[in-house]
Amino acid sequence: MRPLPLVLASTAFAALALSSLSAHNRHAPPTAAEVTWARATAKWDILRRDARAFLPPRPPAPAGVTDLEFSDFFGPIGDRGLELSAKLRALDGRPVRLVGFMVRQTLPTSGVLLLAPQPIQTDEIEYGACDDLPPQVVRVFVPLAPGTPVPLTPGPLLLAGRLELGQHSEPDGRNSFIRMHLDAPALTPLANQHPLVTTTLLPRKFPPSHEIK
């Protein structure tokens, strides 16, 4: 029982030190490095949740083309899963425009790309169709010559084409439910220069991490 006063004294000293440290942290202004780190961390946290968070506004849509977001596709219906939104169903068969990222595939299908809301890579050789593709993935048909693969294009893509809904078994073994058929070539001046016909690359808006202030 004799060591008890020493234990109590040590505990009191530790509490006093923590109290002083907390008071210092509350009143000391953050350093420039701490501010830069906090801002960079916040931006990358946003990017992890939504890779399109810092994209610039898309240019005005052509006449008769409706802009879509991946968040417009579904609505929750509890334990029964997801339900197509009224907006998406109303646009079936009509021209739409969508910003997304081309899925990097080990076994891509000629004339086809998969468009996802964030950058994703699949390995069909190792895992087949057992992948982490979200339900919003759109199967995009590109009007290229038969047997021509779609060049892998990293970064955000702005695609315009006719929307098609409905379950369909594809030749590569996948089942698609949301499809987009890109417009014919030469619809815009850029279409003749870019390998993805009606595909437009959007510039990056956010700066490199070392320039974030």
Image (cartoon, rainbow, N blue to C red):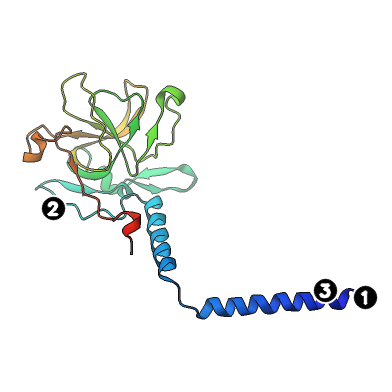
Q: How many marks?
A: 3
| Element assignment for label 2 | loop
Which residue is disc 1 drawn over? 2
In which quarter of the view is residue 37 placed? Answer: bottom left
Q: Amino acid at mark 2?
A: Pro
Which of the marked residues, 2 or 1, is nearer the chain's N terminus?
1
The label nearer to you, 2 versus 1, is: 1
**Disc with the residue nearer the chain's start (2 vs 3):** 3
Tags 2 and 3 touching, CB below 8 Å: no
Q: Is residue 109 above or below residue 34?
A: above
Tell me the kind of residue under disc 1.
Arg
Mark 2–mark 3 distance (CA, rounded to whole Å): 71 Å
- Say whether residue 91 is left or right of residue 40: left
Q: CA distance from mark 1 to mark 3?
A: 10 Å
Closest to the observer, 36 or 160: 36
Q: Secondary structure at mark 3?
A: helix
Instruction: Determine whether the residue tagged by mark 1 lies in a helix, strand or loop.
Output: loop
Mark 1, Cα crowd under 10 Å, few <14 / some 14-19 / many 20+, is few
Q: Considering only vertical position in the picture, is 109 above or below 47?
A: above
Q: Nearer the viewer, residue 147 or 23?
A: 23
Tell me if residue 169 comes above or below residue 103 in the rendering: above
Give the percent coordinates (x, y) of residue 2: 93, 75
Asked whether the beta carbons under mark 1 and mark 3 sit within 8 Å of each other, the answer is no
Label 2 – label 1 distance at C-alpha: 81 Å
In the figure, is residue 20 to the left or right of 184?
right
Neighbourhood count class around disc 3 (C-alpha, 10 Å): few under 14, some 14–19, many 20 upward: few
The image quarter containing residue 126 is: top left
Q: Which mark is residue 60?
A: 2
| Picture residue at 16% right of the left edge, 28% below the top | 143
Which of the 4 quarters of the picture holds residue 83?
top left
Which of the marked residues, 1 or 3, is nearer the chain's N terminus? 1
